[in-house]
Image (cartoon, rainbow, N blue to C red):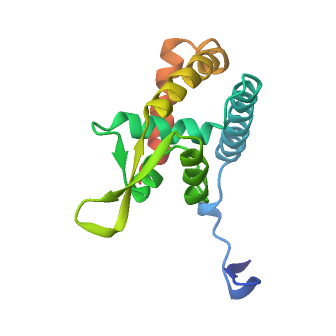
């Protein structure tokens, strides 16, 4: 089997890799992988559609606002936000620009270091996060809570936690 490594402008052939049957996933593991990815896409898509239908921005906005709201002073560095959010933030800087333009967050100087900045949630951002939860929370219930027992939801959460641990 040929192992490929990504390089700028495409893939480069690196070396021949011997196929090791003990490293092949079982059918059950492959099915679990496919269903996990499909479930994530489907559920996020449905919840995003509900938020959009109610006139709200994307889940990534909620995600940032929630993380800022959770910390005592409502402030984090952009790096800390990236580490905490649930959804990939390929361009957090642009997202923060849009959120700042809408008055949901403000950037303030980092105490003692002019090269860094903090992002702070505003009262308007707190209000939007609370309003979005009015759609997001019931959507989580409809798409997950109503389909699983409390025990099943706990088991699923525990299994998914195992998958995320190194």
Q: Quadrant of residue 6?
A: bottom right
Image quadrant containing the C terminus = bottom left
**Relative depth, front residue between 16 and 44:** 44
98 with respect to 27 (left or right): left
The residue located at (45%, 47%) in the rendering is 106
Which percent across, then down, holds residue 124? 49, 31
14 with respect to 99 (left or right): right
Which percent across, then down, holds residue 28? 67, 41
The vertical placement of 28 against 46, above or below, is: below
126 with respect to 41 (left or right): left
Image quadrant containing the N terminus = bottom right
Q: How many callouts does the rendering have? A: 0
106 with respect to 87 (left or right): left
The vertical placement of 125 against 79, above or below, is: above
Which percent across, then down, holds residue 29? 64, 45
**Relative depth, front residue between 10 and 71:** 71
């Amino acid at each position: 089997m040929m192992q490929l490594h990504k390089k700028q402008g495409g893939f480069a052939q690196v070396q021949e890799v011997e196929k090791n049957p003990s490293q092949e996933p079982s059918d059950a593991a492959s099915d679990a992988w496919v269903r996990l990815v499909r479930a994530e896409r489907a559920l996020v898509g449905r919840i995003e559609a509900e938020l959009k239908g109610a006139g709200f921005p994307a889940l990534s906005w909620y995600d940032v606002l929630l993380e800022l709201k959770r910390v005592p002073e409502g402030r984090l560095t952009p790096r800390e936000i990236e580490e905490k959010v649930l959804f990939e933030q390929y361009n957090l800087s642009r997202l923060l620009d849009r959120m700042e333009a809408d008055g949901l967050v403000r950037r303030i100087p980092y105490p003692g270091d002019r090269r860094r900045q903090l992002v702070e949630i505003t009262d308007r951002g707190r209000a939007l996060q609370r309003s979005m939860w009015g759609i997001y929370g019931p959507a989580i219930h409809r798409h997950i809570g109503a389909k699983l027992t409390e025990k099943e939801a706990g088991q699923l959460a525990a299994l998914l936690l195992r998958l995320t641990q190194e």
